Image: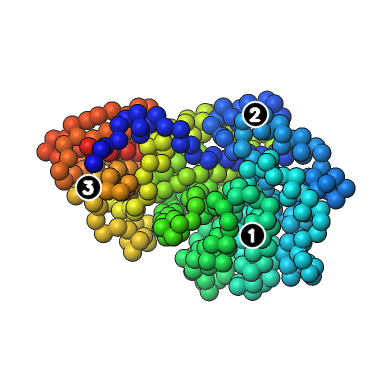
Amino acid sequence: MVKKSINELFGNNAELKIFADCPAKPEDFYMDAYIAAGFNYYIMTEDYVPFLNKEKNGINPDYLEALEYLKRKGLKVLIRNHGNKPDYLKYALNPVSGLSDGYPEYFNNAGKSLQGLADGYYMCDEPSDSYVEWYNPAYSAYLDQLTGLVEWYNKYGQKTYFHINLLQSYGVEMVHGGSVSFEKYVDDFIDKILKKVNGPKSLSSDYYPLAAKGGKNFLKEGFLYDCMTIATKAKRLIEEGHDVYINYCLQAFYPNEGLFIRDLNAYEDFSFQTNVSLCLGAKTFEWYEWSYGKAGISQGEKYKFVKKANGEAQKLYKALSLFKWNGAMTFEGSEYSCSENAFGLIKDMEMKEFSVLKKVQCSADTLVSEFHDEGDYAYMAVNYTEPSAKKSDTIEFTFDGFEQAIVYIEDKPEKVKFDGGKYIVTLKPGQAVFVYPL
């Protein structure tokens, strides 16, 4: 087998999709900062989506101009149904509309006018039976109604990106009271919605992991369970031939006392999230609460942290893009461990063994994933400790039949020689390592 070179791994043109909610009418000073922070997709967000206009061939001229402006800036654009408002594709939701064809003419015109300008559609956020007024209160019926969005997309979307972000596991529990498990919720969405989408689509969830209560910071135990559920379900779809992009929503500027979501104040708070996401197969990131108004460029150091995290993620993604995610395993630290419960939640989803990585020993809790390309293997490991705990993680990898590897830990890749098939590395909080045995 011909092994991949450093240039092949890190010199290719692969790119993560990175986006955030943005003002519907962009401004130059905002856009320059947005692009400089590493964002390459723009979510055009507006309540009730006023660019849909009966008298103007389906689209308000102001918004058509904004779309053209964003394209000149080199950005891809997703049109978002912000707030899941019924005015957006309302009449596509047959039988809610009572219309025989389900498509009034001005939505047809909007779909035609957006062709060649829109690069995708953010169709819905956190769909459930009770969050949105126009959903039927029955669990199965709301999924049936969402198929109207799929029908519209399949007619006008031209195989652009179809994105719906799902509820997280605790949201499913809150809405359905335990009558529907998170895994069933995701499976039903895949079978009834995603499999009908004729184009690239996301499988996405937003579980913000960095929390605080009573003055103590901690990692939410359900975060890893949600991410592993999305990753393993997406793997099934990909193996069936679907073009699926795993998307994880990342926590940026969203402290919330009710959900115990803490403020972020260090680079490792951001890199922990990007690295865990990449380790679990992410191809897109969505930063939440980045830019309502102009928040994204008024946060000082946080802006710099997001910019750096996006840049590092893009470098690492180039290598990961050449492989398929195979699965993950967790390892409790010999000196520091606080993730026993979180790791226990995903034991049934973990791989039983890796292909050429035979042993992992670590001083702190560690997440390791295997990636493959027709018998060629690569690995990624993340220091899985709460970043503010400031715990380093010394990891010893033992490989079978390999004596060197290409290794990447922030900034640049290098070749390293193993000592008796072993490679030892110490990861800082929030840090990850990519290992490609040669």
140 shown above or below 394: below
Question: Vertically, is 101 above or below 357?
Answer: below
| Mark 1 residue crowding within 10 angstroms, few (<14) / some (14–19) / many (20+) | many
Residue 116: name its quadrant: top right
Q: Across the whole image, how many numbered discs are drawn on residues? A: 3
Q: Residue at x 35, y 61 (%)?
A: 349
- Indicate which disc, 1 or 3, sits on the residue closer to the N terminus: 1
* Residue on which the image places disc 3: 357
Q: From the top left corner, tell me how far across and down residue 306 is, in percent.
A: 51, 34
Question: What separation in Å lies between label 1 and label 3 (alpha carbons)?
Answer: 42 Å
Give the spatial CA distance, label 2 vs label 3. 44 Å
Which-is-in-front pick, marks 1 and 3? 1
Disc number for residue 121: none
Res 229 quadrant in image: bottom left
Q: Considering only order in the chain, which callout, 1 or 2, is on the residue closer to the N terminus?
A: 2
Describe residue 116's horizontal placement relative to residue 414 as left or right: right
